[in-house]
Image (cartoon, rainbow, N blue to C red):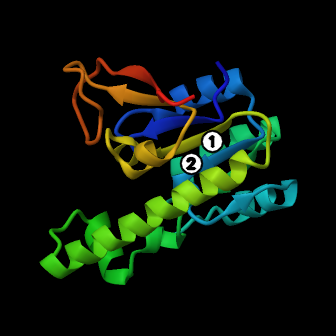
Amino acid sequence: MKFSSILIGSTHGFIDDFLKQKEIIELIKPEFILCEKLEDLKLDSKEKFNGLFQSKKISDMTSFEEIEKLVKLCFNKGIKLIGIDIKNFGFNNILRKKIKNQEELTKSEDEELNKIIKSRERLHLNKILEYNKKTSRPIIIILGSWHLREKSFLRKKLKNYKLILPYDKNNKPLFEPTNDKDIKYKEIISNDS
């Protein structure tokens, strides 16, 4: 069965996400990889990759080191790496500081965060649909596992996809840090091909 999209859940560093990403990239050989952590950057030429290698700057929310291995792999394999999010994930200075420091949000900040998340997820969907039209090969999408949870916006809206998510030893999707060393990946196939 041929899928238009392969979605890979990322833990944002709770485990070494890159190992699974690399395995799938080498198997699929996509033309495009869409990545939440790249935010609004678009690396679709050698010049743009080289510019990022020189600046080593993504944003206040994402360090270059967090996605350096993925960027280098895409550069070396000639894969276009496309950010599918908003600069700094759309967070203002106060939210950025509180989220990075894992501080508690006020009720109004929490409401603002939920609005931002909804607009980000709509952007994710629009970018996925846009890039599916640009290639006959499957695209790989790397998003935080939370965005790919059961009944999530993307899982409701997308069709013809394979989802690859990390699970803990209790057979629960991995959405937060764990001491569990027994991480397995599960493949979930959309039921609407």
Q: Which mark is residue 67?
A: 2
| Neighbours of disc 1 within 10 Å: few (<14), some (14-19), many (20+) | many
Front-lying residue, 101 or 163: 163
Tally of numbered discs: 2
Is residue 102 toward the left or the right of residue 13 in the image? Answer: left
State the image coordinates of residue 15 (x, y, percent, origin top left).
Answer: 38, 33
- Is residue 131 positioned above or below 63 on the image? above
Residue ID for mark 1: 70
Tag 2: amino acid: Ile
Q: Are marks 1 and 2 in contact (CB under 8 Å)?
A: yes
Quarter of image, res 41: bottom right
Any part of residue 35 in sight: yes
| Neighbours of disc 2 within 10 Å: few (<14), some (14-19), many (20+) | some
Front-lying residue, 21 or 68: 21
In the picture, which quadrant includes the C terminus?
top right
Is residue 103 toward the left or the right of residue 166 in the image? Answer: left
Quarter of image, res 6: top right
- Is residue 138 positioned above or below 187 on the image? below
